[in-house]
Image (cartoon, rainbow, N blue to C red):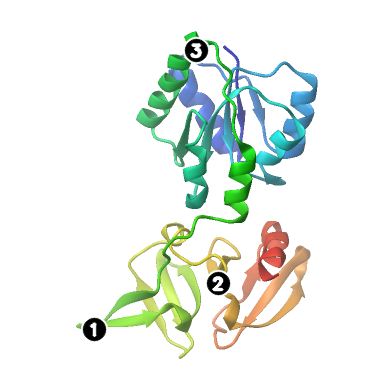
Amino acid sequence: MQVIIIEDEKPSARRLQRMLSSLDIEAEVMLHSVEESIDWFQNNAHPDLIFLDIQLSDGLSFEIFESIDIQSAVIFTTAYDEYALQAFKLNSIDYLLKPIDDDDLAKAVSKFKERLPKQQAVTLDFNDIKNLLVNPIEREYKKRFSVKVGQHLKLINIEDIECLYSENKGTYVFTSEGRNYLLDTTLEQLENELEPDTFFRINRKFFVNINAIKDMVSYTNSRLQIKLNNYNEQDVIVARERVKDFKDWLE
């Protein structure tokens, strides 16, 4: 049985490779981008099973299937993009949420092996997946946060937030009133709770509200510096690898 891993984060790919090895499955091929994957599939026999990350360094992985007619079974791996997970359930073997759990991986592999005797190719409807990625299923996002101020609880409406950031292992919200409040959450948890048309994660430490952006200027190493209406406690910088996505988000 030939298995390959398509994952742009090399440490995650190596971890998955080790986990599969413990299940007596050797994934000898690891690919890290859309371009690299297309080139590989054009020059190699297609594998029995692909472990596929949805977001790669140079695009979304369904672009591979628009260029190559792939009949391999697929198990998706993803860190977030909750709206896409429902699409993955349609015809794929399974999806695994990062960080991947040993038991979940074993169950997914078991599902794949159960299908092997049928000798039927697994066909994925990537147009459906693409449509849902472009037009995500409507869902409810955070409308407000409750924060503790002394012995009181204060409600902060989402439209009053300029940015959210992490500092000294804490997560803070900064409001249009110029106040900081500590939240009982993490930026990772907020990925699926903030409305994506309004909030964008510009780097590992910051989410910004599009309505609070006052100015944008070029910064060193092809980055952008964001000026917000009131927040000026530290530089707000769009990471270089996020600049393109940020510009697309603005439009």
Q: Quadrant of the N terminus?
A: top right
User: In front: mark 3 or mark 1?
Assistant: 3
Mark 2 sits on what residue? Answer: 198
In terms of sequence position, does the residue under pointer 2 or pointer 3 come before the other?
A: 3
The single residue placed furthest to the bottom in the displayed view is: 177
Task: Give the labeled residue for mark 3.
Answer: 116
Label 3 – label 1 distance at C-alpha: 60 Å
In this view, which residue lies farthest toward the top? Answer: 117
Q: Classify 10 Å Cα crowding around label 1: few (below 14), some (14-19), many (20 and above).
A: few
Query: Looking at numbered disc 2 in the image, what kind of residue is underneath it?
Result: Thr
Q: Name the residue located 40 percent from the left edge and 74 percent from the top edge.
A: 143
Question: Which residue lies at the image location 40% right of the left edge and 69% below the top edge?
Answer: 142
Local packing at callout 2 (Cα closer than 10 Å; few below 14, some 14-19, many 20+) is some
Say which of marks 2 and 3 sits in front.
3
Label 3: state its secondary structure.
helix
For marks 3 and 1, the one nearer the N-term is 3
Q: Amino acid at mark 1?
A: Gly
**Residue assigned mark 1:** 150
**Does residue 189 lie above or below 199 as drawn?**
above
Viewer-proximal residue, 183 or 68? 68
Which amino acid lies under the numbered mark 3 shown in the image of this protein?
A: Leu
Q: What secondary structure is marked by label 1?
A: loop
